[in-house]
Image: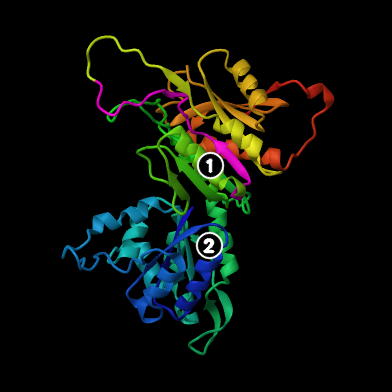
Amino acid sequence: MKVTVGVTGGIAAYKSAELVRDLQKHALDVHVVMTQAAQHFVQPLTFAALTGHKVITGLWAPEDSDTGEAASAIEHIDAAQTTDALVIAPATADILAKMAHGIADDFLTTMYLATTAPVIVAPAMNVNMWQHPATQANLETLASRNVRIVSPESGYLACGMVGAGRLAENSAIVEAVLSVLHHRNDLAGETVLITAGGTREALDPVRFLGNRSSGKMGYALADAAQRRGARVILVTAPTALRAPANAEVVQVITTEDMRRAVLDRLDQTTIVIKAAAVADYRPRVQVGQKLRRSGPLTLELEPTEDILAEVVERRRKGTLIIGFAAETEDALAHGRDKLLRKGADAIVLNDVSREGVGFDSDRNAVTFLTRDRAMELPEMSKRELADRILDEILELRHPRHMLSESDSDISVKSGA
């Protein structure tokens, strides 16, 4: 998940660097926005080095040294729309007042008004400023707008006074962030390799055999796995999708390309999810020039490599292998047959004959098949479904119950 840390101009700004580190320990992708005043306490380079991302310091970016053009502020507003949470720490009395009254005179306050993500503020200031009725009124206003406030602690302050106003401990701020994100870190320590998209087999220099896969399910799984703490390797055939930040992305075209990419990384992985729709056949002969239309054409095809079967055969002990099956008839029977023939731990079964789900759609409904059971996961967005599939995979990794001998046949259990 992407979290934006807003740093404002108080002596506690130096603590924000450690806050960034603590958030990263929870597999969060942290970006930083700084006010002009904050830069008098900590340099943007510090946060750029910690996060690996450019630090936004103003509405208007400086001119590009190569093109001589200034970046657009509208381009920067993408930050407000792509973050999953905005946490401002330290939050000065000044920034709280601007937020409460809707003043947007720098990037951070503009982002606050533009984002629909949860907002957390951790105030830090002089005790008298904290106790002033204006500050307390602003906090009440923000709280009424569902801004989460991590109250400061009491103690010795940088100004020499003693009282409330010291920035809360980073652990309390991190806990608040994880709470609003409903963040799970249950895949920490796992390396998940996911294949996505539809492979292409060349017929001539301009044509290929392919399928309707958009790659959306595989990319949703990659995003969900990374947000839950996994290291993600995404092996993807051509798509128009943007890969999740920080995923290791391997671009492939043919089924053989995908096979090599998967097998080369198999020893690194603990979970393999074969969500790609690989081409089952390729032309036996690829011609070197464009085929001209001159009447009926007969193509001789040969089977492509069976990546799933080979992965099952070559996996390390303890590696979970999850396949996908797209079926148009007798889906459950064909899915179970594939599960048993391939030797995978589970098959995610798609009935692609259904309207409005599956190929090209943002929604899907599947059956998660194992040797013991069939869990029906009803229609939902592919992103929601990705988390449900990962829940089922974790059940394989850490079973919460044992099935009796009478349950040895596949039975249908509602996933509602």
The residue pinned by badge 1 equals 262
Given the current orientation, which residue lies at the most extreme bottom position? 160
- Note whether 63 is above or below 402 in the view shown: below
Q: How far apart are labels 2 and 1 at the CA level?
A: 28 Å
Numbered disc in front, either 2 or 1:
1
Residue type indicated by callout 2: Gln
Q: Main secondary structure of the magenta part?
A: loop
Dot 2 alpha-carbon crowd within 10 angstroms: few under 14, some 14 to 19, many 20 or more: some
Residue at coordinates 60% horizontally, 17% vertically from top-left? Answer: 334
Given the current orientation, which residue lies at the most extreme right position? 405
Residue at coordinates 34% horizontally, 63% vertically from top-left? Answer: 109
- Quarter containing the C terminus: top right
Q: Is label 2 in a helix, a strand or a loop?
A: helix
Residue 148: x and y in percent read: 50, 59
Q: Is residue 272 magenta?
A: yes
- Residue 102 in view here: no
Q: Is residue 102 left or right of residue 49?
A: left
Mark 2 near mark 1, Cβ–Cβ under 8 Å?
Answer: no
- Mark 2 and mark 1 lie on one chain; the one further toward the N terminus is 2
- Which residues make up the magenta segment? 268-291
Residue type indicated by callout 1: Val
The residue pinned by badge 2 equals 24
The residue lying toward the viewer, choosing from 141 and 316, is 316
- Residue 18 in view here: yes
Residue at coordinates 22% horizontally, 19% vertically from top-left? Answer: 292
